[in-house]
Structure formats: structure tokens, C-alpha cells
Image (cartoon, helix red, strand yellow):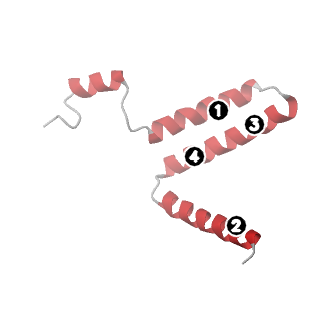
């Protein structure tokens, strides 16, 4: 098998693996990932072309980051830890 064919088989396998992983995501998680990819792509394309970043791109990046954090963060902030403790939420709660 030639190197290019091997590479393309590896790329295909990786894409199939990614599809299986994404099947377990919630709609909001999937949307957050898609938005982040779009925002990063647009911002980096523009930045590469003109060596500058538009405020609208910065806003898209901030929104994408917020959605990623909101949907994928697994560790609470210290503020959240305090509120979890106050309301008896968490691993130590009964």
C-alpha cells in the first residue's frame, strides 16, 4: 500500500472515530463545538490575511469560549464550590 493511501485510510478512520464520539454529545455541546470551530476558522483566516483581528471576530471567539466552558467544564470555580457547599450539592453531600 502506498503512503498516500495509508494516510487517507488513517484520516478516514480518525473521522469515523470522531463521529462515534460526537454521537454521545448533547445538542448544546455539539453546537458549542461547531460554533467554536467556525469562529476560530473565520478569525484566523482574517488575521492571516490582514494581520489584524476585527472586534466582531473577537466577540465570536468570546461567545464560542463561553459556550465551550458552559457545556464542557467539569471542575467548579471557587465561587461555585462555595455555593455547592452552601446548598449541600456535591460528592460530600448526603
Task: Identify which residue is drawn at 21% across, 27% down.
Answer: 87
The x and y percentages for residue 31 are: 56, 47
Location of the C terminus (image quadrant)? top left
Task: Give the quadrant of residue 75.
Answer: top left
* Left or right position of 18 against 90: right
**Which residue is the extreme one toward the front?**
2
Q: Earlier in the sequence, mark 4 or mark 3?
A: 4
The numbered dot on residue 33 is 4
Q: Mark 4 against mark 2, which lies toward the viewer?
A: 2
Question: In the rendering, which numbered label is found on residue 7?
Answer: 2
Nearest to the observer: residue 52 or residue 70? 52
Q: Which numbered circle lies on residue 44?
A: 3
Secondary element at image label 3: helix
Name the residue: 66% across, 64% down: 11
Q: For marks 4 and 1, give the CA distance.
A: 12 Å
SS for dot 4: helix
Residue farthest to the bottom, as pictured: 1
Find residue 61 and name its label. Answer: 1
* Image quadrant in which the N terminus is located: bottom right
Q: Nearer the viewer, mark 2 or mark 1?
A: 2
The mark closer to the camera, 3 or 1, is: 3
Amino acid at each position: 500500500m502506498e503512503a498516500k493511501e495509508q494516510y487517507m485510510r488513517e484520516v478516514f478512520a480518525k473521522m469515523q472515530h470522531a463521529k462515534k464520539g460526537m454521537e454521545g454529545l448533547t445538542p448544546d455541546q455539539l453546537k458549542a463545538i461547531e460554533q467554536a470551530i467556525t469562529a476560530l476558522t473565520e478569525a484566523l483566516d482574517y488575521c492571516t490575511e490582514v494581520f489584524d483581528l476585527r472586534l466582531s471576530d473577537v466577540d465570536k471567539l468570546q461567545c464560542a469560549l463561553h459556550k465551550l466552558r458552559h457545556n464542557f467544564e467539569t471542575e467548579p470555580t471557587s465561587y461555585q464550590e462555595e455555593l455547592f457547599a452552601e446548598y449541600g450539592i456535591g460528592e460530600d453531600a448526603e
